[in-house]
Amino acid sequence: MSDLNTTLVFTAGLIASSIIAIAVGIAYSLILPGIERKVQARIQQRIGPPILTPGWWSVLKFMYKSKTEPIAQMPRFYKSLVYFGIAIVAFLFLFTTPYWWSVLGWGSILGIAGLLKLEEVLYVFMGSQSQSILSATMPVPDLAKGSKWVGIRREFIEQHSADRTLKMMAIGSIPLYLALIVPFVAARSVMLSNVILVQNAGYHSAPWYGIPLPSSPILFTLPGALAAIVYFLGFIMIMNEKPFSILKAKIDVIEGGVLEYAANLRASYYIMRNLLMFALSSIFVTIFLGIPFDPFTPSMMLLNMLLSLILPVAMSALVAFSPILTFRQIYPTTIGLSALGVLAMILSVSI
Amino acid sequence: MTSAMDQKSTQNKDAEKVIEKELSFGPVHPALIEPYRIRLFVNDEIVEDCEININMAYRGIEKLFDGLPVEKALLIAERVCGICSHVHAWNAVRVIEGGLGIHVPERADYIRVLTHEFQRITSHLIFFGHAFEVVGHETFAMRSFLLRESFMDLLQYLGGNRVMPSVPIIGGIRPRADLTEALKKVILERCDQFEVKYADYVRRAVEDPVVMSRLEGIGFMTKDEAIKWHATGPTGRASGWDYDLRKTMKEYKPFDFNVIVLPEGDTKTRVVARALEVLECLKIIRQAVKNLPEGPVANRDWTAKEMKYTEAYDETYRGELMHSYSLDQQGLVRNYKIRTPTITNLAAMEQACIGDHVTEAILTIASCDPCLTCCTRTELVDNQTKRSRFMTEYEIVNKYGWRR
């Protein structure tokens, strides 16, 4: 009976924690693009949009736009991908909240890395499905009789973006995973709870109103600092932002696989993208500083949210000063970053 | 015989080449500032061949000239392009001035050159803005447009309008565009202020290793290729082809300036060539203001009469520009023909982007500074079959009697 009660209390706590985390996470994540755009605008000596416009109001606006049917090969599948994306990112975020740490081992490096990989795969599906009018099927009489090349397979730009996604999956995401592993290697465990324990010993025993600050954050060690740099650049790669936004380079593939998401689907895509940005920033604060997003410890939750601004703000500054890199630059950059990640991992063994 | 053999071997080589796929962009595309179609034939990310189709924005502007009194026709000439409006107006009046031997006062020539160089600077700064936008560096793109404002203001002070200053008229310039002492002072001050900011801007762009890594080593065009495809203007000069019509124009004789010729021939060089040209423009502007001769600004002593088909060439911001027309017995314009620099640069663009990555190919095309709407020409549409086609020059001459 007592086991049943414990299970029921735990399940109720899990559900409540998840609802709070998702509600707060989505609400907060929709403020981040506004901050991002504001920082970029200030660097470019512009005023920039109001903080709530690129996130909140654009999502609300797109929700009420008239719906358009994608020209994708399998429209229903294509439309469902964005909802899968939201679910994947939501679980990725939830797995880093304390209640989920003890559920089937999902609060571990395996849970995080697995979901991140799934999220990357989504872009391949999106790219291979989408067939917007902006490339191969645009009604333009461009097939000249005198052309040197006749009968060549014409590819949609989104499909080309899917090809690029595969390359980025193969090499571009390695730095992020290497950086993710470093705190776990330092804690000699795959579980998030142990990573927090090593950095913030007082957290597990603190009351709900307490402010258990970390005593030895891994960020302030040499391997931690190296891994943080690699994580930051890996974060930009996963977010497909400049300088690593080759999947959605405006000058050729425009938006890549998400090109055909309009109206409510575009709003959902924004939610997915912004929640991913917040989730990855929150994971950074959790594993490198030992401050988890705990819905039942308000001080830690607020501190995590505040510190989660570091990566988006740094990314905005970098975006303002960066061109889009092509694979000519991405390959050597990734190899260099991976080498730095491996070095950080080796050094973290000695912590 | 040798060239025929070379041609044959090229064809065979092309026939053997295997192309994996075609990627096509435009004419509706957020990166293209004008409507045109690019077909890239690629293997993985590498561009093996390129076709550019420009027949998207045909305006029939040459036909509009036909039968108009020459003064009215010249107002249309300025509207051929919004970026190089002055050079079209200027070259249009140079045709009749050359054909009828109309004398132009020296002071007017100086002010025409001054306006020309103002617009060259604004055009090159638009180019930087567009090139950096294509590179993905928004900050540099926006700073470029910010810098451009100084000279847009000066164009407005001079001609009364930022985009269409309408400075030249037949036999001189409009009296309202004459330089006052106050305006001379403003121009010199603006040039000094601009030069400081511009030098800082260029230094930051050139010293940025990430930006330069995007520009270096792509879009190669050799001097021979530049000459073969007649890539005029900074595009050709960045491949080592020392060809600048300003050195042969009588209006530029009093001015001391250097023609920027760089041998490398890649995308970075095309950007750097324009960056250095802006400094030469400043040099010409200062000379024009300081050495401005006294005297009238317009010669009204002329009448429109029959004129044979006459051509005039000018070194515009993108390359060589040709205007040509004849006047009938009543002084009305006939057979107006314009060849903008992009017409000849197009083939060079297609050639230069071979071997680039897809993303770089668009940048290479942009680095040749295309202005496509200005160069789109006659297209025939058959109402019955709904098919359209271009006419060759031979067909046009045969059907409509141009140049007769």
Image (cartoon, helix red, strand yellow):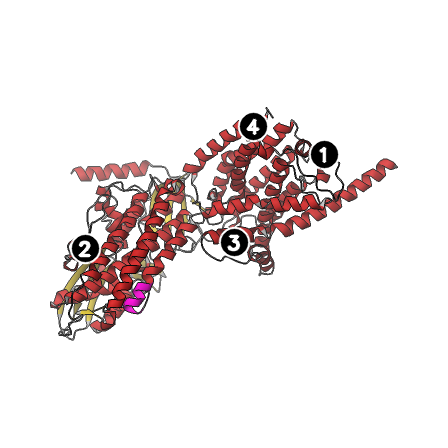
Percent x, y of residue A227: 55, 33
Please report, as a chain letter, where disc 3 is located.
A
Secondary structure beneath label 3: helix
Magenta stretch, main secondary structure class: helix
Label 1 resides on the chain identified as A
> Of residues A70 and B107, which is closer to you in this image?
B107
* Residue at numbered disc 3: A38
Instruction: Estimate the spatial distance between the alpha carbons at disc 2 and disc 1, rounded to whole Å.
Output: 77 Å
SS class of the residue under badge 4? Answer: helix
Circle 2 is placed at which residue position?
B246
Q: State the residue position of label 1.
A: A104
Q: Are marks 4 and 3 on the same chain?
A: yes
Q: Report the disc number at residue A345.
A: 4
Q: Do the residues at discs 4 and 1 belong to one chain?
A: yes
| Label 3 – label 1 distance at C-alpha | 41 Å
Kind of residue sitting beneath label 1: Leu
Secondary element under disc 2, as helix, strand or loop, is: helix
Residue B121 image point, x, y percent: 29, 56
- Decide if residue B365 is on the left or right side of residue A293: left
